[in-house]
Structure formats: C-alpha cells, structure tokens
Amino acid sequence: MPICSACGRDCQEVTVDFGIGHYEYWGAPGYDTRPALVSNCCEADCVWPEDEEPVDEEEVEPEWQ
C-alpha cells in the first residue's frame, strides 16, 4: 500500500486534474488538462515502500523451464 509523502499515512492513489480548464488565447479556444496521481488525503505524491514496490506485469520476464 502506498504512503503519502506529506503526512506519512497509508493512502490510496486517486487521479486529480490540476489543469486550468477552458481558456482562450488570442481568440483561439482551448482546454488545459493535467491529470496526476496523488494521495487521497493530502493530494501529495504517493511513495511505495521498497519492499512493496508495485510490479508491472509487462516488465516481468516469464520463467522458462
């Protein structure tokens, strides 16, 4: 389980959009979105303890016999 880098408690990762949303620049409309994975308690970075590092299944090499 990840740990919040701000408070040090166990947390869950949630996606938050830090973008500014709708904008207009010299008459050209746009939409800014900046999704980020943050902790659900403090909206800070989540850190995984070294012994619980998440494993990406694509990076794991199969064991051949």
Image (cartoon, helix red, strand yellow):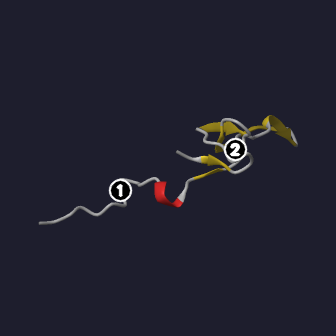
Q: Is residue 53 left or right of residue 4?
A: left
Q: Is residue 17 left or right of residue 49?
A: right
Q: Which residue is pictured at 57% across the width and 47% down the height?
A: 2
Q: Which residue is pictured at 33% across the width and 60% down the height?
A: 60
Q: Does residue 55 sit above or below 20 in this rendering?
A: below
Q: Residue 48 versus residue 38: which sits nearer the camera?
A: 48
Q: Does residue 35 sit above or below 22 in this rendering?
A: below
Q: Residues within 10 Å of mark 1 (few under 14, many from 20)?
A: few
Q: Which residue is pictured at 52% across the width and 45% down the height?
A: 1
User: Disc 1 on helix, strand or loop?
Assistant: loop
Q: Position of residue 48 (x, y in %)?
A: 56, 53
**Which labelled disc corresponds to residue 37?**
none
**Which labelled disc corresponds to residue 58?**
1
Q: Position of residue 7 (x, y in %)?
A: 73, 45
Q: Is residue 33 left or right of residue 27?
A: left
Q: Does residue 46 sit above or below 28 in this rendering?
A: below
Q: Quarter-wise, where is residue 12 in the image?
A: top right
Mark 1 and mark 2 residues within 8 Å of each other at the beta carbon: no
Q: Which residue is mark 2?
A: 34
Instruction: Specify the farthest residue to the left.
Output: 65
Marks 1 and 2, how far apart at CA:
26 Å
Q: Residues within 10 Å of mark 2 (few under 14, many from 20)?
A: few
